[in-house]
Image: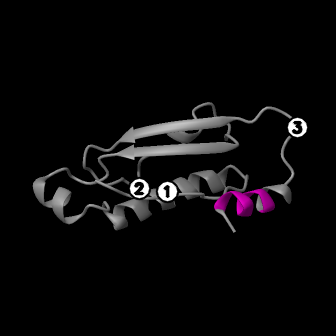
Amino acid sequence: PPVGENWKRQASSQRLPNSAVDVRVCSWNLQGHPVDAGDDLRLLLMPSGRAADIYVIGVQELVELGPMSVFMNTDGDEQRQKELESLVEQVLASSGQRYLRLCSFGMV
């Protein structure tokens, strides 16, 4: 079936809140440095101490933007991306809410 039809079928089985939905949109420029496990992502993801219902997270320069990385790693750095995703998932799990990652991709 078309993507839209599949989404409608899945969405219809879920109960949506009757109140406002809190959306947090985050952007982080790593300037080519790897994510440090000591970085407190709660400050980025939950600045008020409260988790949002939906997160949209964008990261720039997860890889160093040198000539070799631009031409050889056009899909980004998969290892760095997985490390970042793991840290984000740990922070979100600590909120006690359940989250589902809908999309994740890397590019240079």
Number of callouts:
3
Q: Secondary structure at mark 2?
A: loop
Residue 41 seen in the current view: no
Q: Is residue 18 above or below residue 10?
A: above
- The residue to which callout 3 is attached is 18
Residue depth check, mark 2 versus mark 1: number of the one nearer the observer: 1
Residues at marks 3 and 2 touching, judged by CB atoms closer than 8 Å:
no
- The residue to which callout 1 is attached is 87
Of callouts 1 and 3, the N-terminal one: 3
Label 1 packing within 10 angstroms: few (<14), some (14-19), many (20+): some
Q: Secondary structure at mark 1?
A: helix
> What residue is rendered at 36% in x and 66% in y?
78
Of callouts 3 and 2, the N-terminal one: 3
Q: Nearer the viewer, residue 38 or 15?
A: 15
Label 3 packing within 10 angstroms: few (<14), some (14-19), many (20+): few
**76 with respect to 6 (left or right):** left
- Magenta residues span 3-9
Q: Is residue 7 magenta?
A: yes
**24 with respect to 84 (left or right):** right
Q: Secondary structure at mark 3?
A: loop
Q: Is residue 58 above or below residue 5?
A: above
In space, the residues marked 1 and 3 are separated at their CA atoms by 30 Å
- The residue to which callout 2 is attached is 37
